[in-house]
Image (tube, grey):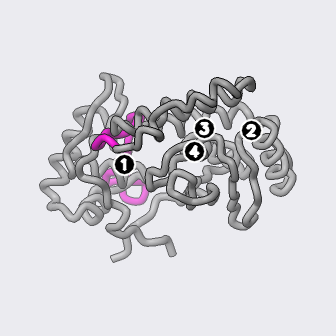
Amino acid sequence: MKPRITSDTALVDPKKIGLFGTRAGIRAVGSPVRVQILSVLRNQDLSFDEIVTLSGKAKSTVSVHLRGLQDEGIIGEKPDPDDLRKKIFFIQSDFLGDLSHRSVFAASEREVPPEFFRSAKDPFVFYRLMFRTIRVSLLAEGINIDPVLQNAGSRVGQGMYGTLAAPELEPFIRNTKAFWQEHNLGRIEVESLYPVILNVFDCFECGDLPVIGRPACAFDSGILGSIFSRHFNGPQQVKELRCYAAGDDHCRFLIEPLPSRKTISE
């Protein structure tokens, strides 16, 4: 039996503005209904009836917004392979990120500590500081670029997979752990193999970020999703269960198969 989609999937911040890259340029989506529709479509392709159920909106309302999103080139449609009389809707544009209220960080969290420049002879330390400064500056302005970082991480993962490849899972993870440590990305400890759960300490991506109350390792998630998809020869999804940026003392990643399109139980 396929897992059920619940309305919790559709809970989004109605004040956020989503940014999508289309062939005609960047489109900003601020309508709460459209943001909600796009939020559930980011997880999976859905039929019209599924979108109606998840959004809790009238069919006529959903229909109007779907048509508008199609006209803007943000979503597309295709025949439902199980019922050619129906349509499946999907996002055909690039999700670039979102805009929200500016975040309030303490001055000490936004400033660049002078000791970095006095002691950072290692270029890695400088680039880590630069990455942190750019990220904090964007977050302070309410700009979330996690989708861009995740896509970039996925491309990096495609390139690095050849150096990690191994026929079995355990040596593949050993290679991954060694790569992470050698390149100062953090120290990986294996929590579980089935499913794969990895704990990362001294995380390059978020270890220096202020606590923002949510996971922030989009780049690492992109890399892990890419390399494990190649290893398992099928799409894998990465869920960050813990994160320094969420106030935890390490980052924890769950890697599991990407579910196929789900149906809603009556």
Q: Which mark is residue 206?
A: 4
Query: Pointers 4 and 2 in contact (CB under 8 A)?
Result: no
Q: Which residue is mark 1?
A: 79
139 or 166: which is nearer to us?
139
Q: Which residue is mark 2?
A: 184
| Distance CA(mark 2)–CA(mark 3) | 19 Å
Sequence-earlier tag: 3 or 4: 3
Q: Which callout, 1 or 3, points to the residue nearer the camera?
A: 3
Residue 101 seen: yes
| Distance CA(mark 4)–CA(mark 2) | 13 Å
Instruction: Tell me if residue 100 is in the magenta stretch.
Output: yes
Instruction: Tell me if residue 32 is in the magenta stretch.
Output: no
| Distance CA(mark 1)–CA(mark 3) | 29 Å
Sequence-earlier tag: 2 or 3: 3
Sequence-earlier tag: 1 or 3: 1
Q: Which callout, 2 or 3, points to the residue nearer the camera?
A: 2
Q: Which callout, 4 or 1, points to the residue nearer the camera?
A: 4
Amino acid under disc 1: Pro
Query: Pointers 4 and 1 in contact (CB under 8 A)?
Result: no
Residue 32, image x and y in percent? 21, 50
Q: Residue at x 75, y 64 (%)?
A: 193
Q: Residue at x 38, y 34 (%)?
A: 93
Q: Which mark is residue 154?
A: 3
User: What's drawn in magenta, residue-wise?
Assistant: 78-103
Q: Residue at x 38, y 42 (%)?
A: 91
What predominant SS class does the magenta segment belong to? strand
Based on the displayed image, in which of its 4 quarters is residue 181 positioned? Answer: top right
